Amino acid sequence: MLPVILAVLGALFLLAPILVVVPMSFSTAISFAFPPPGYWLGYYAKYFTSEEWLEPTLNSLVIAFGAMTLTMLLVVPAAFGYVRYRFRGKTLVNLLIMAPLIVPHVVSALAYYGFLGRAKLTGTLLGVMVAHGMLAVPVAFLVISATLKGFDQNLERAAMSSGAGPFRTFVHVTLPVLRPGMLVGALFAFLSSFNEAVVSIFIGGRGAVTLPKKMYESIRLESDPVIAVVSTLLVSAVVLGVLIAMSLRRRSTHAA
């Protein structure tokens, strides 16, 4: 009974911020106030009609997709090489790949600022993409490497012995089996970029303002209730994504 009670308390502790933020997004107060003095949709209208909020949202989506693409282009070949081949310095390579996960983001941001500044990429979407892509490498690498370690290479050998070339084997045998792991790795890379604020503050500047950066500046300077709207929309997107994933999984299970 005690573990159940602890689990319920833990769940309530995690849900408490959401139960506060969602009502605040409909509040009529000019600042953060809970419980709300009244309810309206004015701050939702402000978010969807304000360029100062929509532009950072679009920037974050573009940067996240770009960082995700860059991360996957780097991680997939690296994971194949790391898992399937033996070479000297393998432990050191793994440590270097994991470094962005170990080093504090403030330290990484300073390093990226110095490097990207010399390349004249600070204050640009491309510069933020590169920095976010590097930060997302460790998580995506862990996911895809774990997927590769569980892959049965006899499937590839059987395809090649039947006359399929390396490319056809990869497309028709390897990729379908590894696709779920690659999708999860890509999703983690996307979310890592979309939620990153520290590096965005250093690298983005005024030319590449992201949504987390805008939220941080807004809550620090003016306590704009639109932040509650953004938070509610992000939580809703996550819940919707989980429901869609569960629905697709049920369909595939019934089809099988």
Image: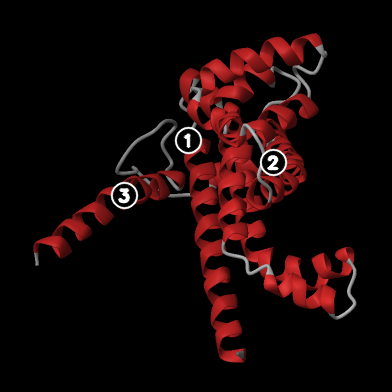
Q: Position of residue 238 (x, y in %)?
A: 52, 56
Mark 2 lies on residue: 64
Q: 8 or 45: nearer the eye?
A: 8
Q: Position of residue 93 (x, y in %)?
A: 62, 33
Quarter the C terminus occupies: bottom right
Question: What whole-number distance in Å separates the C-alpha atoms at marks 1 and 2?
Answer: 25 Å
> Which comes before the other along the chain, label 3 or label 1?
3
Question: What whole-number distance in Å separates the C-alpha atoms at marks 3 and 1?
Answer: 21 Å
Which residue does the image show at 47% across and 20% down from the upper left?
220
Cβ–Cβ below 8 Å for labels 3 and 1?
no
Q: Nearer the viewer, mark 3 or mark 1?
A: 3
Question: What whole-number distance in Å separates the C-alpha atoms at marks 2 and 3?
Answer: 26 Å
Amino acid type, mark 1: Pro
Mark 3 lies on residue: 14
Q: 146 or 70: nearer the eye?
A: 146
Disc on res. 225: 1
